[in-house]
Image (spheres, grey):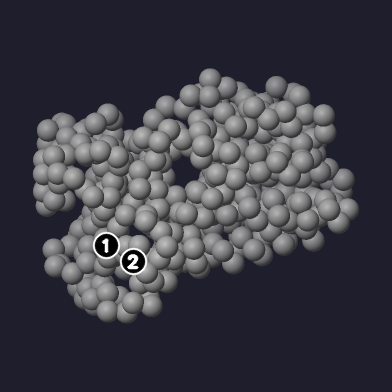
């Protein structure tokens, strides 16, 4: 049990637990409140999602002691990335040439990340995890943040942080709105085996009416991420396995040979979110509750980790200076830094998605020109590569 509770975190997902670990390392006492049972936190089921991690994110995870808990076979390197537009022979390619890296980044399954986060957090004496607990209310006063649980318990601390998903209930209860973009699309994710090696190359294929990403995992296995209109998703989820395998193989133009489904298909609605504010008095947003990204540029959890680092710096600096960690002057520093880091990526991603999913002829012409032009501008490609690796 925590002797002194400095921060209450709502949500024991990867972002919330990463913040708890980071703050505990900095000497803070932390309570994490989570609605899921402890058994699920300790051994989360596979959910089909493979998380792309930049080098900067990997550095943060190593400093938190989480990376060391990932089995070596569950960390898959991305050595090259290619963006393709329909049947066009042109593609926009990114690799590590001109950098000091041997990989653009890494892929780790979401449930592996979640399990490691819980293992580290639950081993730290200054972190209290209250699981199987529903939040019935949140509030702030001049002196404290308050979290009310459905079982009647009341928790207080100088600061409360919401890391409870892009549809954050705590954010809404605190009167903070969010700019949401519902793409009207669904993402279907699954693992597929194949006959030919992928050589560590990630592909993002923008076909007309549908997008297919094929992400390289260790061995002759890849993760497929299919984005399609929401009204078509049920049919694809229920499609007989041989028909589904044939469809993905053909859409990927048999680049890896016949593809075979490994495990289950999972589907998720595609909604991007950007909170109108990241902070209020004694309250801060983190992870998807602050910035919920479209997955096409693979910056979601990376942005969450950057927020962990920024918020920890702000709170550590405040404590060293003898200042109140829940004051707006302290939290505004975090907000300013995190907005600078995430706003351009968020807006740029949405522009990219809009361009490459518009099937009208003017948009097709523009994106074809973009692919040809970008390949001829090394500085532009180098800048995008720095964003992909997190070394910008």
Residue closer to the observer: 33 or 261: 261
At a point 54% along the width and 65% down the height, the residue shown is 343
Whether residue 210 sits left or right of residue 324 in the image: it is left
Q: Are marks 1 and 2 in contact (CB under 8 Å)?
A: no
List x then y, in percent, for residue 229. Answer: 28, 50
First in sequence, mark 1 or 2: give its number. Answer: 1
List x then y, in percent, for residue 341. Answer: 56, 63
Give the mark toward the camera: 1 or 2: 2
List x then y, in percent, for residue 130. Answer: 67, 26
List x then y, in percent, for residue 277. Answer: 64, 59
Number of residues whose C-alpha sits closer than 10 Å to that of mark 1, classed few (under 14), some (14–19) or many (20 or more): some
Q: Is disc 2 placed on a helix, strand or loop?
A: loop
Whether residue 182 sits left or right of residue 259 in the image: it is right
For the question of whether residue 282 can be seen, the reply is yes
Residue closer to the observer: 190 or 386: 386
Name the residue beneath numbered marker 2: 97
**Number of numbered callouts drawn:** 2
Q: Quadrant of residue 168?
A: top right
Q: Quadrant of residue 246?
A: top left
The N terminus, quarter of image:
top right
Number of residues whose C-alpha sits closer than 10 Å to that of mark 2, classed few (under 14), some (14–19) or many (20 or more): few
């Amino acid at each position: 049990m925590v002797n002194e509770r400095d921060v209450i975190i709502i949500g024991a997902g990867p972002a919330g637990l990463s913040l708890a670990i980071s703050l505990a390392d900095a000497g803070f006492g932390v309570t994490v409140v989570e609605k899921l049972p402890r058994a699920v936190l300790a051994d989360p089921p596979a959910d089909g999602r493979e998380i792309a991690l930049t080098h900067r994110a990997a550095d943060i995870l190593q400093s938190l002691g989480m990376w060391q808990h990932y089995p070596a076979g569950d960390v898959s390197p991305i050595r090259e990335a290619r963006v393709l537009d329909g049947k066009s022979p042109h593609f926009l390619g990114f690799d590590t040439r001109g950098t000091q890296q041997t990989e653009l980044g890494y892929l780790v399954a979401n449930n592996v990340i979640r399990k490691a986060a819980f293992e580290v957090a639950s081993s730290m004496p200054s972190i209290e995890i209250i699981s199987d607990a529903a939040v019935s209310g949140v509030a702030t006063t001049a002196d404290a943040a308050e979290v009310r649980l459905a079982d009647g318990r009341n928790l207080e601390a100088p600061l409360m942080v919401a890391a409870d998903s892009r549809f954050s209930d705590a954010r809404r209860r605190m009167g903070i709105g969010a700019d949401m973009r519902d793409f009207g699309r669904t993402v279907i994710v699954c693992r597929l085996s194949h006959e030919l090696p992928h050589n560590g190359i990630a592909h993002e294929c923008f076909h007309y009416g549908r997008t297919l990403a094929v992400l390289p995992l260790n061995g002759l296995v890849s993760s497929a991420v299919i984005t399609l209109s929401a009204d078509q998703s049920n049919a694809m989820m229920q499609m007989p396995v041989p028909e589904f395998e044939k469809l993905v193989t053909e859409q990927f133009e048999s680049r890896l040979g016949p593809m075979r489904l490994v495990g289950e298909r999972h589907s998720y609605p595609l909604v991007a979110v950007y909170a109108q504010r990241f902070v209020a008095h004694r309250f801060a947003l983190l992870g998807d509750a602050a910035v919920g990204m479209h997955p096409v540029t693979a910056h979601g959890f990376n942005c969450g980790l950057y927020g962990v680092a920024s918020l920890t710096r702000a709170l550590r600096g405040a404590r060293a200076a003898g200042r109140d960690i829940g004051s707006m002057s302290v939290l505004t520093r975090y907000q300013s830094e995190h907005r600078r880091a995430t706003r351009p990526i968020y807006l740029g991603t949405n522009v990219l998605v809009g361009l490459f999913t518009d099937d009208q002829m003017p948009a097709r012409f523009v994106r074809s020109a973009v692919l040809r032009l970008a390949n001829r501008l090394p500085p532009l490609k180098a800048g995008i590569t720095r964003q992909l690796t997190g070394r910008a």
